[in-house]
Image (cartoon, rainbow, N blue to C red):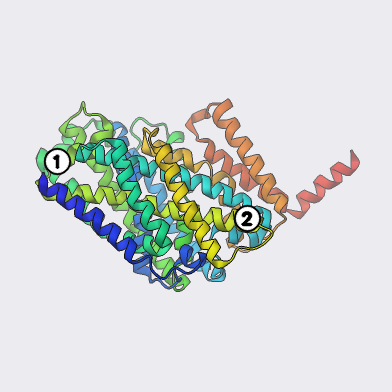
Amino acid sequence: MTIDYTIVLVYLLGILALGLYTSRGIKNLEDYAVAGRNYPAVIIFATLSASFIGGGFTLGNAEKVFLFGIVNILALWGFSVKEVLVSIFIAPKMDRFRDCISVGDIMQRAYGKTSKVISGVFAVMVCMGIVGAQVGAIGYVFEVFLNMPRTFGILLGCGIVIVYVTLGGMKAVIFTDVAQFLILLVGLPLALYFGAQQVGGWSVVMANVPTNHLTLLGEMPIAAFVSLFLVFLLGETLVPPYLQRLLIGKNSKSVARGTLWSGIFSFPFFFISGAIGLVALTMAPDLNPNLAIPYVVQTALPVGASGLVVAAIICVVMSSADSFLNSAAVAFSNDIIKPLKRVPLSEKNELVLAKIVTFTVGISAIIFAIQIQSILDILIYAYHFWAPIVLVPLIAAIFGYKAPCRHFVTAAVCSITAMLTWSMILDSPYGIDGLIIGVAVNALVMYVCSHPQIMGACKQAESLE
């Protein structure tokens, strides 16, 4: 056990040292947000993968597969499909946004300054929610794996993230993400291999888990599955950290390749994290599902390998938390404060503000994280601050669409109203998530507002009244 503790300690100190080392040379907010825009496809692949593979897609995925079967893996592949689609249709268009550092910058081009502020507000909200979920997962990992108090684990793990992200911004995030990606690339497959060997091989797992856990939909109605698939497909599409990854490449080809490789990589990775849930179910059917991965690691892995896997799980969570923490700071500084200030800040003061916001958001996430229970559920909840409001107008802007800000605001208000009505008043009929309804209404209203014949008919009807 001492060896395992040593491995984890060395990992934490190494990540902190790397983050601090790479924080040098940050001169302005652009450096803090996009770190030079000169990264090749392989770096984009590594940092993007490390960013989206967080606690929800590992610990949360294993928990849900333990409970419901492989249907959760199939639903999670909606995220994978999304990454492939972004690499094909969105990434090749990013060269035209070489002067942008955030979602708000792109939105301002299409809908004006007010849209930048509004999208900035929702960007901060979704990032804070996801940071909170990851910080909660950090505490959970320290508590379960290392027998440390959960609050101490949150303070230690998140404290390290806050320090290097506050000082180094995106540059520190990218370099630590690459190191963390290499560790998780080895760690999670090791857990699945040793876990399957512990029970006698994969055939034993297949023979002992409930039959419906191995069917495509399990006991989930098809409408509910399609809804969950679409939630994962739409929920994190072009959220600030992933959009920033589309802005850091040396050209659009590098961005497209890196994004495509990341999407392809996520298919087997989500299978691996989910399959560990099936192994845990075979080993201990009465186990608390939240403990699926920790139980397999602690039971099946030898000393040394166990420490490496624990480090991999910690890095899984930290690499997601640091990305969303940096994006929250950039959105607040660049998309909310900057356009609202009458007297522009100097480059130095912009950078200082971004660092202060990073630190503040990190502390807020620590407070929020103490209340978190299910990591994956929190992620899905956070998605509702993004996809129904910003996603459709953002995609339209990337494709060159421009419109008055009132079109964006009208669509946002209608989508929020529809989402809340569907979820809270109608109680999500047929198991369809309100996020799907919100996105559909947003797209419909944006189309109606921009269609000349429809708008002309509406104005004619108003004049007749």
Tell me the residue at 24%/42% (across/down).
Answer: 275
Residue 439 in the image: above or below residue 38 = above
Residue at mark 1: 203
The answer to whether any part of residue 82 appears in the image is no
- Which residue is located at x 32 percent, y 57 percent? 265
Residue that badge 2 annotates = 116
**Along the line of sight, the residue nearer the viewer: 201 or 367:** 367
Q: Position of residue 107 (x, y in %)?
A: 61, 58
Q: Give the quarter of the image for residue 200.
A: top left
Q: Residue at x 37, y 44 (%)?
A: 134
Q: Amino acid at mark 1?
A: Ser
Secondary structure under tag 1 reads helix
Q: Nearer the viewer, residue 332 or 352?
A: 352
Type of amino acid under label 2: Lys
In the image, residue 353 sits, relative to residue 231, either above or below, namely: below
The x and y percentages for residue 141 are 26, 41
Earlier sequence position, callout 1 versus callout 2: 2
Cα–Cα gap, marks 1 and 2: 54 Å
Whole-percent x, y for residue 355 in the image: 47, 57
Which SS class for mark 2?
A: helix
Q: CB under 8 Å between callouts 1 and 2?
A: no
Q: Which mark is residue 381?
A: none
Quadrant (top left, top right, bottom left, bottom right) of the C terminus? top right
Horizontally, residue 198 falls left or right of residue 83, namely left
Q: Is residue 26 visible?
A: yes
Q: Nearer the viewer, mark 1 or mark 2?
A: 2
Residue drawn at x 23%, y 30% is 210
Q: Quadrant of residue 184?
A: bottom left
Q: Dot 1, how many residues are within 10 Å of its Cα: few (below 14), some (14-19), or many (20+)?
A: few
Pick the front one: 51 or 267: 51
